[in-house]
Amino acid sequence: MRGITLDEISESTKISRRHLESLEREDFDALPGGIFNKGFVRAYARYLGLDEDQAVVDYSSASAEQPPPPDQFPLEVHEKPNREMNPRRSSVPLVLALLALLVVLAVFWARNRGHRSEAPANAAPPVAAADSQQAAPAPSATPEPTAITPDSVGPTHTPAAVVPVAEHTFVVVIKAKEDSWVSLTADGKKTWEGTLKADNKRLVRAAKRIIVTTGNAGGIEISHNGRALGALGSESERRTLTFNPGGLVQ
């Protein structure tokens, strides 16, 4: 129960392991006999932190012998017993494990620090997002469209500026002459749907395809990469228009 081995008791009490095994088996005939047996019992009990006198009495009862006088004890314990559980457990493995953990953490920290220091020099410039304000303008072959903020709604008297067009994308601007229901889809993803109020605009940008669906084709005007296409239908006419980088498809 205390994690103490017979070898430890034998080393401290100088009682042979063979005699200790006989004592634990209560094989008293295998012991030297006489006062030595009681001395073994007393030393054994003292090392384990048991009541020595009671252990001798229990031995005498089991072996039909009388307990000796209290001053007769031929053996002495050369090491003070440690009554804690597992008294001989070493702390060396724990210390080594902590040192190994510290080494691993130091190596990991040093590698991460090296990666962070190299990142600014090797990092490539970020790719412009579809709606980035720093994207390259449309090719000079097409006129520059009226400036509006991407996906914003505003009146037609917004101050003029160049609409930024990201590389490998194209832009379609829908301007409402009167209140018109409009649905916009860019590269298969619906970006906006609702009623576009008169004198307001809506911009949509895509890389491959833009689909404009309206319930009032005569109430809106459309431009592609700054080139005005004008009205593409009559009032209250429902139309679905598809654009690609080259212009209107249908």
Image (cartoon, rainbow, N blue to C red):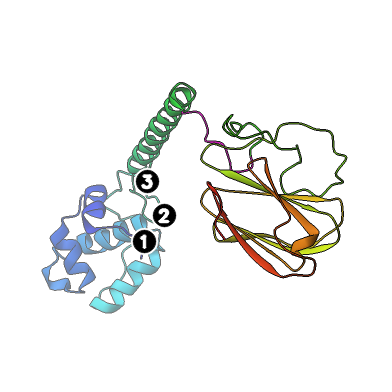
- For the residues labelled 3 and 2, the Cα–Cα distance comes to 9 Å
- Residue at the disc numbered 2: 83
Q: Residues within 10 Å of mark 2 (few under 14, many from 20)?
A: few
Query: Which residue is rendered at x = 41% and y = 63% of the image?
Result: 51
- Name the residue located 88 percent from the left edge and 40 percent from the top edge: 157
Give, as a three-letter code, the residue at label 2: Arg
Q: Secondary structure at mark 2?
A: loop
Q: Quadrant of the C terminus?
A: bottom right
- Could you tell me the amino acid type at mark 1? Arg
Mark 3: which amino acid?
A: Lys
Answer whether labels 2 and 1 touch (C-beta < 8 Å): yes
Point out the stretch of residues depicted in magenta. 124-131
| 232 and 6: which is toward the camera | 232
Cα distance between the residues tagged 3 and 1: 16 Å
- Report whether 39 appears left or right of 225: left
Q: Position of residue 147 (x, y in %)?
A: 75, 37
Residue 2's disc number? 1
Determine which residue is flagged by label 3.
80
The secondary structure type at the circle numbered 1 is loop
Q: Residue 187 sits in which quadrant?
A: bottom right
Residue farthest to the front, as pictured: 234
Q: Position of residue 68 (x, y in %)?
A: 31, 64
